[in-house]
Image (cartoon, rainbow, N blue to C red):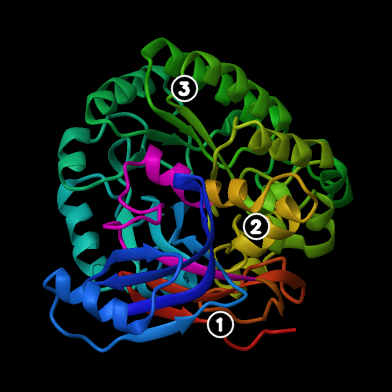
Amino acid sequence: MLLIRNGTLINPGLSQEGSYDILAAGGRILAIRPELDEELAQRLALAEGLPPEDLEVLDARGLYVLPGLIDTHAHFRDPGFTYKEDLFSGAAAAARGGYTTVILMANTKPAVDTAERLRAIQERAASAPIRLLQAANVTRDMAGRELADLPALAEAGAPCFTDDGLPVMDPDILRAALRAASPLGLPVSLHEEDPALIAQNGIHGGGRAAAHYGIGGSPREAEYTMIRRDLAIAVEEKARLVIQHISTKEGVEAVRQARKVNPLIHAEATPHHFSLTEEAVIEKGTLAKVNPPIRTEEDRMAIIEGMKDGTIDIIATDHAPHASYEKERPLTQAPSGMIGLETALSLAYRNLVLPGHLTLMEMTALFTSNPAAYYHLEGGVIREGAPADFCLFSPDSQWKVPETFASRSSNSPFIGEVLPGLVAFTICRGKVVCRAEAHLH
């Protein structure tokens, strides 16, 4: 059993904030009380018929107790590219960042386009220290020509369908996918970039970074034209749809208008898109090369405004590990993507809460109760009977982003920065799976 004492609860799913003690037993939350000592904890456990267990007491004085964070969009590269990341190195990175549930993208090798492949990953993921959910592909082999068997994949446990890394270019295929996914109650999640409009991916087209490197890049039209097309289809079909890692002000506005008609449409923002501008690509090179690219200050602020007014209601990392030698290639040859699980909460605290754009409660909802509700996940809220998944966050601590991470890869543009707010403990199923170490500044 675990007793968390003296912490300040931040619980957006129940709009609850205050000083509470929390008792966890059997992987569940057994009791939440303003005051709960060890003797009462033992009596409550006995009353529930739980077997006697050693009671661990965790003093959370000075810490915020949040629900365990949920990432709806991460790449663990397993199977096929485990030299970059695997299920267990990715889980360790997630735990260090305060995450207790992660949805894994399906652009693996082989692709996750059959129930058999999905179950094979789930069986291995079951021994990870946190909850790993494997997304399934929209189309067979991510080729965009033939739908995967979405009902079979849903029955096997897929939380969503995505060909992330590639857009679904054929509108008829997308419409068929939305029609197939709708009765299953699961969203289709889309990477929105039209390759026909992209000269070089990962760099904002027509901006300062593209001019600096003398390349064409990926213009904003590549994203927002696809977003507008796919939103129109989702509105017509009254379907669940997620617009992934939105990067343009036009894309944000398109989602804003579409959600007024179809509230089943949702959108993600990544920490790098609301923290950085294309100046980072000039300064950091390939470490800041991502798809879709980091764009202008106007785009960054439009994303933040989208979070403020509820247009964007999920923060997702798009954690995308790559080996050092891959990122050391010339800019146009290096792969796009950066790791993000270990820095996400501090970046959100620095760029959303401290400037006053969002309250801590509002920011926490984007990481917890909102994704849990949309993806029908059991966690995301702290209440009796719920999973005992927590992120204990120290707002007054600072830490220096290290050169090496729990992740197998280190492709982060934030290395060396001192960030505010530290994940002090991550608890999943009532067990401490990560404690803060090193890095304190």
Reading the image, the residue beneath label 2 is 333
Q: CA distance from mark 3 to mark 1?
A: 39 Å
Disc 3 crowd, CA 10 A, few/some/many (<14, 14-19, 20+): some
Disc 2 crowd, CA 10 A, few/some/many (<14, 14-19, 20+): few
Q: Residue at x 15, y 39 (%)?
A: 152
Magenta region, residue range: 367-394
Q: Tag 1's secondary structure?
A: loop
Judge by depth and name the residue closer to the eye, 338 or 434: 434
Q: Which quadrant of the structure image shows residue 196?
A: top right
User: Which label belongs to residue 379?
Assistant: none
| Dot placed on the residue nearer the N-terminal end, 3 or 2 | 3
Q: In this rendering, would 208 be left or right of 399? A: right
Disc 1 crowd, CA 10 A, few/some/many (<14, 14-19, 20+): some
Q: Residue at x 59, y 57 (%)?
A: 337
Q: Mark 3 or mark 2: which is in front?
A: 3
Q: Mark 1 is on which residue type?
A: Ala
Q: Mark 3 is on which residue type?
A: Pro
User: Which label belongs to residue 263?
Assistant: 3
